Amino acid sequence: MDYQMDHAVAILRRTPATLKTLLAGLPDVWVRSDAGPGTWSAYAVVGHLLHGEETDWLARARIILEHGESRPFDPFNRTAMFDKYTDYSLERLLDAFEQARVRNLEALDALKITSEKLALKGTHPALGTVTLGQLLSTWVVHDLNHIGQILETLSHQYAQAVGPWRAYLGILRPIVTE
């Protein structure tokens, strides 16, 4: 499927509510546990998503629209949440993420993105030339990727408890870390 703004926004708009429904009110053992070395807890993932809302997606879209390829994107600190939100409760993180997402979707709408603008190019510090359409598509898939990551991490808390049924539960396959 090619990028379509209304289809993308349909996912982006739902992510905060999806995360709240899934995580709000769960005991800390669920949301603060990871699945082993190199994996993130659900809490860390929500912090990562919030940091992206505050510093990445819209900032990069604006760089493409205003500067094209002449100004590379600022590097994104993928692990900033480990230092930035240490005093936040999960509920505060979820609320802050929801508020930031609402603001960003309003700002995205105000940019009046056309199909011509989707073809505009920018420069990613590691990936090189990218288009606005690719950036906005990545924003959607990034959300979905991290929702899946949260589900995997939660599932792995019971990886041993399920006993032999593990063979039938694909979500319990080994998690590959970067």
Image: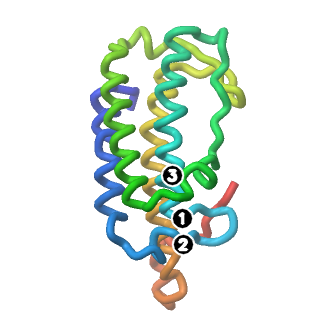
Mark 3 closeness class: few <14, some 14–19, many ≥20 residues within 10 Å:
many
Check residue 47 in the rendering and tell me which mark sits there, or answer none. 3
Q: Is residue 47 left or right of residue 96?
A: right
User: Above or below — where is 71 with respect to 31?
Assistant: above
Where is the C terminus found, in terms of image quarters?
Answer: bottom right
At mark 3, the secondary structure is helix
The disc placed on residue 41 is 1
| Residue appearing at x 49%, y 89% in the figure | 161
Q: What distance separates the C-alpha of mark 3 from that of mark 2?
A: 14 Å
Q: Among all residues in the image, which is located at the extreme front?
A: 87
Q: Which residue is mark 2?
A: 33
> Which label's residue is closer to the chain start, 1 or 2?
2
Locate residue 136: give its quadrant: top left
Circle 1 Cα neighbour tier, 10 Å, few/some/many (<14 / 14–19 / ≥20): many
Instruction: Estimate the x, y position of residue 28 in percent, counting from the top left.
Output: 45, 74
Q: In terms of secondary structure, where does tag 2 sit?
A: loop
**How does the figure colour the protein chain or chains?**
rainbow
Q: Residue at x 46, y 23 (%)?
A: 133
Please tell me whether residue 60 is drawn above or below residue 144 in the rendered image. above
- Amino acid at pointer 2: Ser
Q: Amino acid at mark 1?
A: Ser
What is the distance, in whole Å, between disc 1 and disc 3 at their CAs?
10 Å
Q: Secondary structure at mark 1?
A: loop
Q: Look at the numbered discs 1 and 2 and tell me whether their residues touch, using CB distance below 8 Å.
A: yes
Give whichever of discs 3 and 2 has the lower sequence position: 2
